[in-house]
Image (cartoon, rainbow, N blue to C red):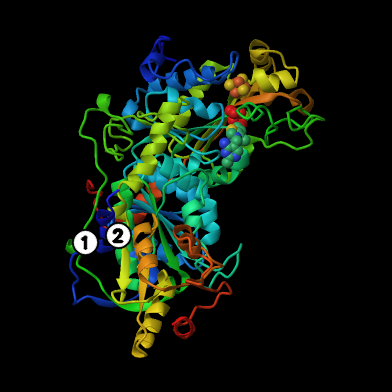
Amino acid sequence: MAKEKKEKVVENMETEVVAEDTRKVVLMQGNEAVARGALAAGLDFYAGYPITPSTEIAEILSEELPKKGGKFIQMEDEIASICAIIGASLAGAKAMTATSGPGFSLMQEGIGFAKATETPCVVVDVQRGGVSTGLPTKPSQGDIMQSKWGSHGDNPAIVLYPHTVKECYELAIRAINLSEKYRTCVTLLLDEVLGHMREAVKLPDISNVRIVNRLRPTVPPEWYKHYDENQKYISPVASYGEGYRFHVTGLAHDALGFPTNKASEVAAQMKRLKRKITHNIRDLVQIESYMMEDATVAIFAVGICARSAKAAIKAAREYGIKVGLLRPITIWPFPDDAVKKMLRDVDTIIVPELNEGQLINELHRLTKDKADGKIIPIQRSDGEMITPTHIFRVIKEAH
Amino acid sequence: MANIPQKVVHKYLRHNKKFPHVWCPGCSNGTTLGSIIRAIAELNYDRDGITMVSGIGCSSRMPVYVDFNTLHTLHGRALPFATGIKMQKPEQKVIVITGDGDATAIGGNHFIHACRRNIDITTIVLNNNIYGMTGGQYSPTTPTGDRATTSPYGNIDPVFDICELAMAAGATFVARTTAFHALETQDIIKKALEHKGFSVVEVVSACPVIYGRLNKKGGGPEMMMHMRDNSVPLKATEKMTPEQLEGKIVRGIFKQVNKLEYCDAYANLMSQFNVKEEAKK
Ligand SMILES: Cc1ncc(C[n+]2csc(CCOP(=O)(O)OP(=O)(O)O)c2C)c(N)n1
Ligand code: SF4
Ligand SMILES: [Mg+2]
């Protein structure tokens, strides 16, 4: 594989918001930004079950969706919520749900169903402290691995991770766009503090938002295949009630969607699920590279930890320390190439994360020098934040 | 009842694609599928306008065989999937096919809440008193004392009465019939489909290969005869004593009331905003 070509990944900073409207500056919470972004992307259907710290998303959508002819329903639990959005999506809706760790766990079987049946939908997980009921009102980044491996079997994952309220808005749009484009369940991971934090954001005019709709079949119903093997991993998709009368099952299925045990047909399905991610890494992976040009020390962080890191970097730069930040915006698929480049380019990497070491394992996967102290963890799972001061101290020690 | 020729089922089956089916010889699931299809044929519904959704189980394999919009979901979850479809496309006729375990064990919570909402979905529960697909473990409707692979000494669990459960939870059309009474089943399903609101039809079914064998109930025909000889129409129960009713399957429509349907309630809510259901995308 051509290396140069793959490293262009780093350049993919295109946003779903084509232009901002500077007149529309509003003070907004992360959760509200997610709801507004989803509406801007054309959300038609929301089903959910209340859980702190995600509930504002449901509350706002219960108010807004009926106004535009959209559907809102509060289901009896999170299992029902994920199933309802998949059903609505099969009937043609852009559909979303939002939850937090415990609910995200309950949704995992349904998330696998959406991925296996290639049904577009979006799950927002505003993470709280775990294990179990944990710390409902405290931040954590404990679901990084759950968002990749939570459902059983090998399933493709597209997971986006904002670090500002503005980015919550943009990535909610991008999550819906990617779910439509790739026919899959996309996860948006938020930190509790981001969900509840208010910041000034400039909302774009709707006409400046790029909207992606799933490909629709152009063939007559007799020719329609719900999973057309002649298309490159993503085929057009019909909705129920349009004359196509297709079958959908979570069982392994053939191109028409009918259950199969035939190894060659099962292999074709598994290959398609995998390749639609691996063949589109350049489109899917987004990272932010902040002050990395001359950096000898890099911080690798997502979400709210990246905010603390940026503040620490500014302070450290005043002391002449060449430190930068590499921040995955798409965390799954993992930005392997950008991380490998970082591992080559810098002497030290600091990995602050609000868990007991999830992101750092991915760095270990990509390097052989684990023992030489090159990768320094900062980990907290007691519900408190990793502060800029803390990161600054570690930068100074490492320098 | 109109005279519908037998061949009518072929119009609604994916017969050149999906047969032979998975069901065992003597299983009553096919008989009930016939009743469902003939009910739909009598109502002259357009195949494109029907979405059939199921959970997981032998009974839940049904949708793959019919030429409608079909969805085979997760164990117990057919109703929330169906709720999403119905909310998004209220003009679709949504039919849920489910088993006793699917509907009242793993899916029990969804079942009572779908009843409570009174969403316009027809739910057909094929109650064979056992987990057929997984090889015969006891379900919430396995009679107390009966054998299952997980109750080798006899089942100690009390049972659910599916119809009472549905009525108490708010379903607006509730009926029971048996697979033996195929024409009655057809007629009741027809009424359930015509009913606006959440309708539940429990079809007492025969799993001769597992439940029948474990409990010495004989083969398919014997189990069908048992349904014939041990069931009574609701009307006839008026004159029967509790002793006479003991062990009898009561057949008929237990509840049929009109109440505001869920999608209509949502439409009412939206009407204050003057939105047009514009053709999207
Ligand atoms: C989450 C989950 N748990 C368990 C199973 C295994 N399972 C498949 S079918 C079934 C029972 C089906 O019983 P019922 O609903 O009565 O249908 P029947 O086969 O009798 O028609 C079970 C336990 C599963 N598929 N998924
Ligand atoms: S196991 Fe029982 S319910 Fe399942 S197909 Fe066989 S006879 Fe029918
Ligand atoms: Mg059963």
Q: Residues within 10 Å of mark 1 (few under 14, many from 20)?
A: many
Q: Residues within 10 Å of mark 2 (few under 14, many from 20)?
A: many
The numbered mark at residue A293 is none
Residue at mark 1: chain: A
Q: Which residue is mark 2?
A: A173
- Provide the residue designation for mark 1: A209
Q: Where does the image place residue A204, in percent across and percent down from the top left?
A: 21, 68
Does A398 appear above or below A357? below
Q: Chain of mark 2?
A: A
For the N terminus of chain B, the image quarter is top left
Q: Is residue A162 among the parts visible in the rendering?
A: no
Residue farthest right in this picture: B153
Taking the view exactly as shown, the residue that stands out farthest to the bottom is A319
Q: Position of residue A120 (x, y in %)?
A: 35, 47
Identified at 76% across, 38% down, the residue is B157
Q: Residue B159 or A5: which is nearer the viewer? A: A5
The part of the image, by quadrant, that contains residue A90 is top left
Identity of the residue drawn at 18% across and 72% down = A21
Q: Are marks 1 and 2 on the same chain?
A: yes
Q: Secondary structure at mark 2?
A: helix
At mark 1, the secondary structure is loop
Quadrant housing residue A118: top left
- Residue A192 visible in this rendered orientation of the protein: yes
Q: Is A196 in front, or is A11?
A: A11
Q: Amino acid at mark 2?
A: Ile
Q: Amino acid at mark 1?
A: Val
Asked if A180 appears above or below A174 in the picture, the reply is above
